[in-house]
Image (cartoon, coloured by chain):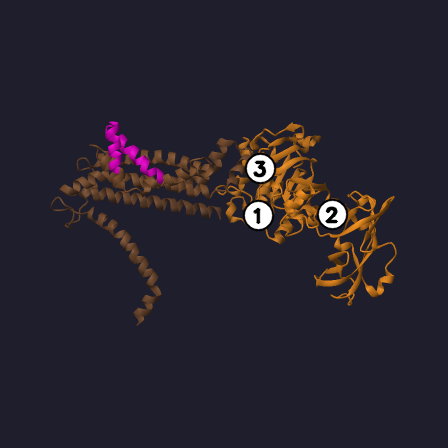
């Protein structure tokens, strides 16, 4: 009886914790198995604790090359998509032009299209153009599918921006360039940052489109998939865990900085 | 803190010449000539959509006039972008930069003009608006009244030739608004800069401004000191928009010397010639106006005690409401239904209750005359046509 009352009172907390566990369990498995020393080629069964893979993350041939390539692609794709997407978002919110309505809906099309269909048609396009598949075709494809997400993120922010802020800046002797740098950009920054992060994440772990447009180039997701056929090296778990830790650290640092600033102000 | 450099010369006036603004078919501001004397507190008063904010924005440079020129002193600034005009604005809802703290908000204008040492000026300005303590807070951490003062400080620190205020008190509650009215007036007197203030609140305009321009449907209906506008309105719009007015449609009986005698409902009423803005041909129509607080109320039984020489009409009290300092009566009379009378509660006559027969009387000097060819309701609250009424006048 006591348990029933306790449960009634804490049902939300329990449900919350269970959901959190559901979300985090895969990460826990990845982390735990990065310390495994598997017997065969497959890292699917727990054998023995070891830090071998952590001490030699590049020990598998091709892994670190593919990781480097993926990071590089993600960086340039983020840069390209963020620049273009921010400009598109500003154009869509700030200006009235003839094709505005059409562009507004067309921009969502890449998000709505099944990825595998888009990948196949991109391949057709590249082949017909006679393009050599590799880094550049992947980059073009990545910028393309990241663009819509950046536009959506930045647009939301720009739409909620009071146009009077820019008028106030102009009224206070800021020319067009100064107004943009001192007022528009800082206020739009959270939206742009959100768009950029999204673009980075999407580009970094994209498999389908990359697989179709890569030719003989191998990115990190392709490497993982390829090696999964022959056996999964522990290093994959090491890279996965490291990425997760870096992401968590970044979040913690930004939260700490935010908190300190707030406390200084108060 | 007194006026800086060039502004001490006569060149501090704001002169609008034939300024117009159209959006497609819609004309927001009809050709307008307006001079705001240097150092004055000038109010543009009107209902929403009357063109007052558009006029202000054309002075600021945020709106390009369709035609006409804007002069600041001797300088023609019509073609200058806002960031090159020696004019600053206090925006409606303030438009403080949310990503900068109060100090940086106030320093913004100085920094953009390349002034390096801003500390002393910013601190002085924050003192002037009593916000020294809040310098490192972000705008959203301040109350509405404080944000409003930051907006004023941010504009004033640049020593503009003219400070433009766009409904600066609209977002504040009544009590705070009263307080800020006095505050703004104090600051204006202290710094001696020309203030152009846009508002739809007639009380606010009258309390603060030295000179008020009443706007309606893109035109200035009348320009003058608050007392002049109140006492001598020249259109029914102004008479109704500033306070309340009672109107009687009357016929000119005779016009001799300084007095016009009018016939209304069988009685005669006197109107001073000097206060009539309508053509006074014998037999012509004139709208006679009188403010509710100028009228005295006497019970019909004592009508004989009313001194000679006063304008008088008879009526019956339809409604009365006691509001503390005064009692407001609505009186039905043959010449005008719903005549409003405000009586100070000095000695209350217990017989003055709804249904009582009364005589309304007032000093003829308090009567004003208007052209009868205009809507009686122009400018009243709820007359959907504050705009259309103006068109009729035109």
| Mark 2 or 1, nearer chain start | 1
Query: Magenta span covers which residues?
Result: A119-148
| Mark 3 or 2, nearer chain start | 3
The residues bearing labels 3 and 1 have C-alpha atoms spaced at a distance of 41 Å
The C terminus of chain B is located in which quarter?
Answer: top right
The residues bearing labels 2 and 1 have C-alpha atoms spaced at a distance of 32 Å
Residue marked by disc 2: B230
Q: Position of residue B235 (x, y in %)?
A: 72, 45
Q: Can you tell which of label 2 and label 1 is closer to the viewer?
A: 2
Secondary structure under tag 1 reads helix
The N terminus of chain B is located in which quarter?
Answer: top right
Which chain's residue wears label 1? Answer: B
Which residue is nearer to you in this view: B325 or B244?
B244
- Horizontally, residue B356 falls left or right of residue B44, namely right
- Horizontally, residue B282 falls left or right of residue A1, namely right
Q: Can you tell which of label 3 and label 2 is closer to the viewer?
A: 3
Q: Position of residue B130 (x, y in %)?
A: 60, 46
For the image, the number of numbered tags is 3
Q: Position of residue A226 (x, y in %)?
A: 17, 39
Which chain's residue wears label 2? Answer: B
Q: Are marks 2 and 1 in contact (CB under 8 Å)?
A: no
The residues bearing labels 3 and 2 have C-alpha atoms spaced at a distance of 34 Å
Residue marked by disc 1: B146
Label 2 neighbour load within 10 Å: few <14, some 14-19, many 20+ = many
Residue that appears at 52% across and 31% down: A175
Residue that appears at 55% across and 50% down: B143
Q: Locate residue B209: give its quadrant.
A: top right
Q: Colour of chain B?
A: orange
| Mark 3 or 1, nearer chain start | 3
Residue that appears at 35% across and 35% down: A81
Which chain shows up in brown? A
**Residue B25: which numbered mark, if any?**
3
């Amino acid at each position: 009886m006591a348990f029933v009352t306790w449960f009634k009172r804490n049902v939300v907390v329990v449900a919350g914790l269970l959901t959190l566990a559901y979300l985090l369990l895969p990460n826990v498995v990845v982390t735990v198995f990065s310390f495994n020393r598997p017997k065969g080629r497959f890292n699917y069964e727990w054998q023995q604790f070891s830090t071998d893979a952590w001490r030699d993350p590049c020990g598998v041939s091709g892994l670190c090359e593919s990781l480097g390539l993926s990071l590089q692609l993600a960086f340039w794709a983020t840069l390209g998509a963020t620049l273009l997407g921010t400009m598109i978002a500003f154009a869509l919110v700030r200006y009235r032009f003839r094709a505005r309505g059409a562009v507004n809906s067309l921009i969502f099309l890449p998000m709505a299209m099944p990825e595998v269909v888009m990948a196949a048609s991109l391949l057709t396009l590249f082949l017909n153009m006679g393009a050599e598949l590799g880094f550049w075709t992947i980059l073009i494809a990545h910028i393309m599918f990241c663009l819509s997400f950046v536009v959506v993120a930045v647009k939301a922010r720009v739409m909620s921006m009071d146009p009077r802020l820019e008028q106030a800046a102009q009224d206070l002797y800021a020319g067009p360039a100064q107004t943009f740098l001192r007022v528009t950009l800082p206020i739009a920054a959270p939206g742009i940052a959100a768009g950029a992060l999204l673009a980075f994440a999407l580009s970094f772990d994209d498999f389908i489109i990359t697989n179709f447009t890569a030719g003989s180039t191998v990115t990190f997701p392709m490497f993982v998939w390829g090696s999964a056929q022959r056996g999964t090296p522990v290093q994959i778990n090491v890279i996965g865990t490291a990425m997760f830790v870096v992401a968590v650290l970044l979040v913690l640092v930004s939260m700490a900085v935010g908190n300190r600033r707030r406390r200084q102000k108060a | 803190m007194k006026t800086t450099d060039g502004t001490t010369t006569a060149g501090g006036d704001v002169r609008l010449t034939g300024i117009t603004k159209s959006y497609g078919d819609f004309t927001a501001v009809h050709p307008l000539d307006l001079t705001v004397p240097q150092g004055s507190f000038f109010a543009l008063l009107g209902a929403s959509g009357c063109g007052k904010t558009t006029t202000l924005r054309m002075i600021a440079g945020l709106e390009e006039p369709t035609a006409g020129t804007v002069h600041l002193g001797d300088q023609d600034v019509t073609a200058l972008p806002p960031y090159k005009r020696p004019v600053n604005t206090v925006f409606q809802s303030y438009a403080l930069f949310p990503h900068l703290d109060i100090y940086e908000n106030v320093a913004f204008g100085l920094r953009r003009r390349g002034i390096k040492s801003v500390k002393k000026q910013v601190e002085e300005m924050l003192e002037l608006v009593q916000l020294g303590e809040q310098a490192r807070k972000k705008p959203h951490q301040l109350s509405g009244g404080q944000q409003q003062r930051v907006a004023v400080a941010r504009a004033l620190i640049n020593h503009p030739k003219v400070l433009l205020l766009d409904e600066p008190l609209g977002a504040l509650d009544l009590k705070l608004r009263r307080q800020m009215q006095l505050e703004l007036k104090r600051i204006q007197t202290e710094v001696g800069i020309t203030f152009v203030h846009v508002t739809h609140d007639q009380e606010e305009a009258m309390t603060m401004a030295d000179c008020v321009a009443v706007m309606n449907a893109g035109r200035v209906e009348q320009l003058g000191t608050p007392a002049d506008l109140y006492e001598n309105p020249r259109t029914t719009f102004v008479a109704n928009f500033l306070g309340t007015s009672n109107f009687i449609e009357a016929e000119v009986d005779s016009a001799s010397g300084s007095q016009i005698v009018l016939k209304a409902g069988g009685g005669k009423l006197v109107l001073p010639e000097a206060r009539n803005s309508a053509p006074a041909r014998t037999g012509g129509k004139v709208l006679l106006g009188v403010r509710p607080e100028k009228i005295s109320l006497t019970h019909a039984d004592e009508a004989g005690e009313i001194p000679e020489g006063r304008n008088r009409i008879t009526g019956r009290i339809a409604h009365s409401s006691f509001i503390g300092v005064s009692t407001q009566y609505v009186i039905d009379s043959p010449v005008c239904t719903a005549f409003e009378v405000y009586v100070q509660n000095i000695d209350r006559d217990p017989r003055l209750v709804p249904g009582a027969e009364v005589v309304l009387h007032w000093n003829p000097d308090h009567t004003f005359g208007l052209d009868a060819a205009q809507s009686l309701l122009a400018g009243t609250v709820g007359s959907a046509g504050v705009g259309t009424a103006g068109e009729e006048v035109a």
